[in-house]
Amino acid sequence: MTTSDPRSDADLLAAHVAGDQGAFEELVRRHRDRLWAVALRTTGDPEEAADALQDALISAYRRAEQFRGDSAVTTWLHRIVVNASLDRLRRRKARPTSTLPDDDESLPGAVVADPTDQMGQREIQLVVVQALSELPEDQRAAVILVDVEGWSIEEASLKLGIPEGTVKSRCFRGRGKLAKRLAFLRNLDSPNPVVDPEGGRTQHG
């Protein structure tokens, strides 16, 4: 998102800490759409995502002085949003529903349709998010942190409060279920329609 403010994200955060009342607002304006997409993908529910994003931005606002500068500001914000989303899921034990993420990413390695086919791409995103939402919460959290958000096993272990071996095990089981659930996507280059065996959704190659 373009902005007239020439300051970098790090400069804006530092200015916020120093008392610039408009700096944090500018930072949020730059990245809100992306952070919303992260919250939506993690929670799988628009209402939960909105609440999680609000929690995360309040947390970031209050904890800005704790930013050490050893990563990009966007990475710092990204992780706060993921943390808030997972915390909200744990507290409410929400059952996520199928939603469409605002960005164009899906699970690493997932087979996708021709990028020029926007309708097909959106259909695939919907199916991937639905498949994630069907995983047991413990497996889903591990898969999202490691495979979707790119956290290391060690980092996911610390965040989830479980041994590294448990993270690996949950990822393994979750990936296996996703592989079965999304197997039909591998046939997208076929000239014949491809039917989602769970949802009955039809795709064309």
Image: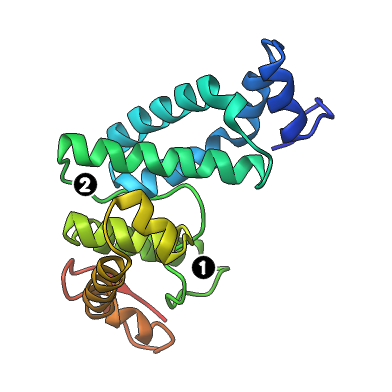
User: Which residue is situated farthest in the right direction here?
Assistant: 6
- Residue 176 position (above or below residue 74): below
- Mark 1 lies on residue: 117
Please tell me in which quadrant of the rendered image residue 84 appears. Answer: top left
Q: Provide residue 2's location: percent of width, then percent of height.
A: 75, 35
The answer to whether residue 144 is left or right of residue 19 is: left
| Residue 102: x %, y % from top left | 47, 47
Mark 1 falls on what kind of element? loop
Rounded to the nearest angstrom, the CA distance separating label 1 from label 2 is: 27 Å
Other residues around mark 1 within 10 Å, as few (<14) / some (14–19) / many (≥20) = few
Look at the picture and state if 3 lies above or below 37: above
Q: Residues within 10 Å of mark 2 (few under 14, many from 20)?
A: many
**Amino acid type shown at disc 1:** Asp
Name the residue beneath numbered marker 2.
Answer: 96
The x, y position of residue 21, in whole percent, is 67, 10
Find residue 110 and report its horizontal and vertical position in percent.
Answer: 42, 75
The residue positioned 80% from the left and 25% from the top of the image is 5
Q: Earlier in the sequence, mark 1 or mark 2?
A: 2
Query: Mark 1 or mark 2, which is nearer to you?
Result: 2
Q: Is residue 169 left or right of residue 40?
A: left
**Residue 183 at least partly seen:** yes
Q: Residue at x 24, y 70 (%)?
A: 174
Element assignment for label 2: loop
Q: Answer left or right for 22 relative to 36.
A: right
Please identify the residue farthest to the front as the structure is shown: 163
Against 59, residue 188 (above or below) is below
Q: Which residue is painted at 61% across and 25% down in the image?
A: 65
Viewed as shown, does residue 28 lie left or right of 69?
left
Q: Nearer the viewer, residue 3 or 53?
A: 53
Point out the image quarter for the C terminus.
bottom left
